């Protein structure tokens, strides 16, 4: 029986029991979700830091996506350059054979030159995700246009076809750039009028149209040797850009791991501690209800 003299104690006992029950419910949610709270209000003192960390993580995530996109393009470009090196090597072998004897007419230089020229154009017109990779800033149109190639373009000397001539190129001189960190922008890629490509293209042009002219075949051999010397440097430039991307991605991965751990420390609950706390509160609640029940049964008759 609750009396006026015991009412305050009874209410205080119920308040403590309800508070313990609330803690049990919160701890149950923490154990099942693994989180200290289901919203920022539950971690009010750390919420600003959590939001800041999440924003930093999002920025790094976006940088990594950009890095992966550019890395894919550079991988395709590197593969293309490798194939151009194979063409240059094959062309040199063909020209050495053609210039070292009197069998040039038997080597079908015109047909084989045309095949290599088609391969040359096809490789430099490589696309990825609808973008022409070797076109500079003109990524929506093919950079090599053999059909419109004008051999009398500026820079061409009709008396000396060994002079560089990139009249086949329909792109521009802009190099692509990508922001890969807060304060780092990578200028990457190479255009189809690079001297290494131009030398190979000129060698193929000269080979295709030589018609047994030894002087022109010698010029073609000189041009392809120039291309073979230059192409590894171009490939190395692409490789250096890929290395810069890998290093930047590694830095972001380290930062993201740190951020994820920091957010986890702020948001996630220690399940073992939570279960210990749950057990202690459960015992306390049972004891509280037991005491409350006993107090409710106290009477003067039982006391006497």
Image (cartoon, rainbow, N blue to C red):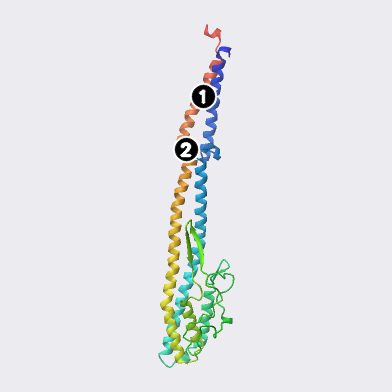
Seen in the picture, residue 99 relative to 257 is either above or below; the reply is below
Q: How many marks?
A: 2
Residue 79 in view: yes
Residue that lies at the very extreme toward the top in this rendered image: 304
* Distance between the alpha carbons at the discs numbered 2 and 1: 22 Å
* Label 2 SS: helix
Disc 2: CA contacts within 10 A as few (<14), some (14-19) or many (>=20): some
Seen in the picture, residue 92 relative to 243 is either above or below; the reply is below
Where residue 252 sits: x, y (%)?
46, 54
Q: Residue 286 got which mark?
A: 1
Residue 172: quarter of image: bottom right
Query: Which residue is under mark 2?
Result: 271
Where residue 127 sits: x, y (%)?
55, 70
Residue positioned 47% across, 73% down in the render: 81
Seen in the picture, residue 188 relative to 106 is either above or below; the reply is above
* Label 1 SS: helix
Q: Residue 34 got which mark?
A: none
Where residue 105 sits: x, y (%)?
48, 92
* First-in-chain label (2 vs 1): 2
Where residue 280 sits: x, y (%)?
47, 28
Q: Are marks 2 and 1 in contact (CB under 8 Å)?
A: no
């Amino acid at each position: 029986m609750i009396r006026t003299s015991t009412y305050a104690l009874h209410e205080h006992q119920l308040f403590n029991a309800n508070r313990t029950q609330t803690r049990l419910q919160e701890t149950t949610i923490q154990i099942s979700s693994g989180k200290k709270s289901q919203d920022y209000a539950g971690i009010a003192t750390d919420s600003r830091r959590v939001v800041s960390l999440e924003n930093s993580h999002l920025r790094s995530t976006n940088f990594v996506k950009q890095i992966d996109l550019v890395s894919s393009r550079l991988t395709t470009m590197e593969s293309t350059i490798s194939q151009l090196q194979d063409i240059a090597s094959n062309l040199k072998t063909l020209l050495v054979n053609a210039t070292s004897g009197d069998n040039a007419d038997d080597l079908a230089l015109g047909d084989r030159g045309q095949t290599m020229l088609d391969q040359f154009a096809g490789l430099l017109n490589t696309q990825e995700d609808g973008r022409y990779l070797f076109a500079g800033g003109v990524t929506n149109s093919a950079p090599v246009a053999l059909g419109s190639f004008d051999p009398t373009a500026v820079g061409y000397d009709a008396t000396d076809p060994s002079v560089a001539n990139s009249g086949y190129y329909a792109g521009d001189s802009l190099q692509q750039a990508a922001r890969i960190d807060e304060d780092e922008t990578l200028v990457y890629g190479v255009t189809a009028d690079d001297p290494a490509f131009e030398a190979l293209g000129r060698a193929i042009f000269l080979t295709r149209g030589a018609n047994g002219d030894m002087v022109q075949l010698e010029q073609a051999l000189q041009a392809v040797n120039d291309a073979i010397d230059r192409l590894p440097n171009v490939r190395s430039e692409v490789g250096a850009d890929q290395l810069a991307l890998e290093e930047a991605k590694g830095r972001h991965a380290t930062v993201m791991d740190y951020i994820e751990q920091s957010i986890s420390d702020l948001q996630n609950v220690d399940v073992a501690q939570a279960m210990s706390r749950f057990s202690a509160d459960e015992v306390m609640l049972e004891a509280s209800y037991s005491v409350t029940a006993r107090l409710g049964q106290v009477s003067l008759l039982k006391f006497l």
